């Protein structure tokens, strides 16, 4: 089966459960294909957990959910050494991070110390405990949710943590007909009714196909011009880092693949600019985590930046 047919099969499996959110589903799969992580910010009850579960089933991988609370410790996520029965040696007991898809539910309810336990896993695809490194499974995706910042008892994610997320999205409420379908189906569909998912090896085919997508030097210049302008634009106090530029580059290749192209076009860059970059910049007049102001500044910048001929 071709790589694109595999992508279509995975997408159909997710959209059978996540109704009326085709763009969200597409970008969530782009995050997987680009080997990145996904942050969903929204109010409770709009389908964030459903999307995470459907993603795990769609890529045929293992799934663990971690409910972040203020008393959660780093070892509760990464795992801890356990004393063997003979009391002469220790054996590492893996934590819930050792799964293909990890749902970090309400991540901003965890303390900064606990949030930091994710940094190495998300960047290096491994966990180090007591000086010993333990590789994480492939594929590996952290899908984190967080409540809006006017909710009590939350800790804002530090910039270093936000920068590890390839894409940041909001689910939003479903439209009327999609919500009607959800109500009539009892809130969702059973897994037995869904199309078959992929295997981790087939996910590897999707990743390889996206990596093979070509980017013309003129489109690369367009991306680099955009990044450079964020660093000098008066509407932004902090521009896009090199890691952010790389994230946009990889996501654009994955989106082009998802749309059955073997080359990136400027519209791929434009569509991904806000979900990939808005949480990486700091806008003048906005708070540290105010992505709405940052998103507005990026849209204005895109309007002013002419695409390549």
Image (cartoon, rainbow, N blue to C red):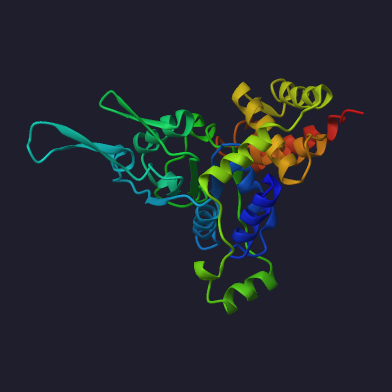
Left or right of 97? Residue 4 is: right
Is residue 291 placed above or below 238 in the rendered structure? below
The quarter of the picture where the C terminus appears is: top right
Q: Residue at x 46, y 45 (%)?
A: 100
> Which image quarter: residue 262?
top right
Left or right of 229? Residue 168 is: left
Q: Residue furthest right?
A: 309
Looking at the picture, how far across and down is residue 169, in whole percent? 61, 47
Figure label count: 0
Pick the front one: 261 or 70: 261
Pick the front one: 228 or 307: 307
Is residue 232 placed above or below 50 in the rendered structure? above
Left or right of 295? Residue 171 is: left
Looking at the picture, how far across and down is residue 180, in whole percent? 64, 76
Q: Residue at x 55, y 49 (%)?
A: 41
Pick the front one: 31 or 150: 31
Is residue 127 placed above or below 57 in the rendered structure? above
Is residue 133 placed above or below 156 in the rendered structure? above
Q: Residue furthest front?
A: 1
Looking at the picture, how far across and down is residue 72, in whole percent? 30, 45
Q: Is residue 254 visible?
A: yes
Left or right of 60? Residue 273 is: right
Looking at the picture, how far across and down is residue 135, in whole percent? 39, 32
Q: Residue at x 62, y 28 (%)?
A: 244
Q: Is residue 290 visible?
A: no
> Which image quarter: residue 197?
bottom right
Q: Residue furthest bottom?
A: 184
């Amino acid at each position: 089966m071709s790589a694109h047919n595999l992508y279509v099969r995975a997408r159909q499996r997710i959209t059978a459960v996540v109704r009326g959110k085709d763009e969200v589903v597409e970008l969530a799969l782009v995050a997987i294909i680009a080997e990145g992580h996904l942050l969903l910010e929204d109010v409770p009850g709009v389908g964030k957990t459903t999307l995470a579960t459907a993603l795990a089933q769609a890529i045929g991988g293992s799934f663990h959910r971690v409910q972040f609370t203020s008393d959660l410790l780093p070892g509760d996520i990464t795992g801890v050494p356990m004393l063997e029965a003979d009391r002469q040696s220790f054996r590492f007991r893996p934590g819930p991070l050792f799964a293909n898809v990890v749902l970090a539910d309400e991540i901003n309810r965890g303390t900064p110390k606990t949030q930091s336990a994710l940094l190495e896993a998300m960047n290096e695809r491994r966990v180090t405990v007591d000086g010993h490194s333990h590789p994480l499974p492939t594929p590996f995706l952290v899908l984190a949710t967080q409540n809006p910042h006017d909710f009590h008892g939350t800790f804002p994610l530090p910039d270093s943590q936000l920068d590890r997320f390839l894409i940041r999205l909001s689910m939003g409420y479903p439209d009327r007909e999609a919500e009607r379908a959800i109500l009539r189906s009892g809130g969702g569909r059973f897994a037995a009714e869904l199309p078959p998912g992929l295997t981790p090896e087939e996910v590897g085919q999707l990743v390889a196909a996206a990596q093979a997508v070509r980017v013309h030097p003129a489109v690369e210049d367009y991306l680099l011009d955009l990044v450079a302008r964020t660093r000098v634009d008066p509407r932004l106090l902090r521009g896009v880092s090199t890691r952010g530029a790389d994230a946009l580059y990889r996501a654009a290749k994955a989106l082009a693949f998802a749309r059955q192209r073997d080359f990136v076009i400027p519209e791929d860059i434009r569509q991904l600019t806000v979900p990939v970059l808005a949480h990486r910049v700091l806008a003048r007049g906005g708070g540290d985590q105010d992505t709405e102001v940052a998103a507005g500044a990026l849209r204005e910048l895109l309007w002013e930046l002419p695409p390549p001929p």
